[in-house]
Amino acid sequence: MPFPNCDVVEFNFLDAATYGPAVAGCNTVFLLRPPAISNTGDTLNRFIDVARAAGVDHIVFVSVVGAGSNPLVPHHAVEHHLRHGPPGWTILRPGFFAQNLESTYRRDIQNDDRIYVPAGRGKVAFIDTRDLANVAVQALLDPLRHAGQAYTLTGPVALSFAEVADLLSSELKRTVRYTPASTMGYIRHLLDAGTPLIQALVQSALHVGLRFGQAERVDPTLGRLMDRPALTMAQYVHDRRTLWMAR
């Protein structure tokens, strides 16, 4: 057993038969949408209904910034379902993750010493997922305090990708540059790396939106909710510096 004193059960959003056993005996649930799932009505919302019927009285859902008013993103339907159901819910709306540097951008930084995205001069208030986890745990352990709340969560300062490249250069002791990509150039770049077409299109659209300030607004909520200041991008880069060492 990987987790002592815990029961491990199978769960699959695409198999409703696994929903009931997964929530049996639970009173709180942490809910995160897998990127591959776009039909949230038949999956996440159906799961929520099963969880409620099984006695779950609080659900902490990780959404995205702007989902409350944007019906085009899959998270919107889940938020709507929660808000129009029983009151035991907390919605977390994080912005762009600092950890994109170690997933989406890692290979370009490591192998080519560059960040290559179609974001132009747009700035981003990157949030460290460690801070997101901090707030999620608070909401799970103290549901009365956080019930019925929808929190927009961003990092403490908005940075351009050129500024992020400078932070990486300083920490890694080598020059990392930001190369603004064209939309089509970025799509080709992703496809050449083996990214599925739909994912490449969505990823490109998200980054193009950064050109127009879609992720630059700094919200103070994160700092107020934690017992410490929000982590900065400089702290994140320092803590994870070994990930981008050149091969």
Image (tube, grey):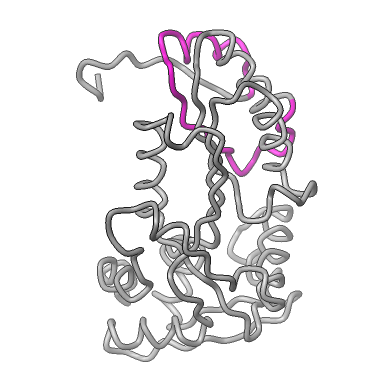
Q: Residue at x 68, y 34 (%)?
A: 78
Place residue 182 in its image quadrant.
bottom right
Place residue 119 in its image quadrant.
bottom right
Can residue 32 be seen?
A: no
Q: Residue at x 64, y 41 (%)?
A: 36
Magenta stretch: give its range: 14-41
Q: Residue at x 72, y 35 (%)?
A: 80
Q: Nearer the viewer, residue 128 or 90?
A: 90
Place residue 188 in its image quadrant.
bottom right
Query: Could you say where residue 161 lies in the image, as x and y percent from the top left?
Result: 52, 81
Q: Nearer the viewer, residue 243 or 71?
A: 71
- Examine the rendered structure and indicate whether residue 112 appears above or below residue 42: below
Q: Is residue 205 left or right of residue 36?
A: right
- Examine the rendered structure and indicate whether residue 223 appears above or below residue 87: below
- Examine the rendered structure and indicate whether residue 18 appears above or below residue 106: above
Q: Is residue 189 left or right of residue 129?
A: right
Examine the structure image and report whether residue 77 is included in the region drawn in magenta: no
The residue at the far left in this view is 4
The residue at the far right in this view is 71
Q: Residue at x 62, y 21 (%)?
A: 86
Query: Could you say where residue 128 lies in the image, as x and y percent from the top left?
Result: 40, 60
- Examine the rendered structure and indicate whether residue 109 appears above or below residue 29: below
Q: Is residue 192 left or right of residue 30?
A: right
Q: Nearer the viewer, residue 14 or 188?
A: 14
In the picture, the quarter occupied by the C terminus is bottom left
In the picture, the quarter occupied by the N terminus is top left
Examine the structure image and report whether residue 23 is included in the region drawn in magenta: yes
Query: Could you say where residue 116 lies in the image, as x and y percent from the top left?
Result: 57, 78
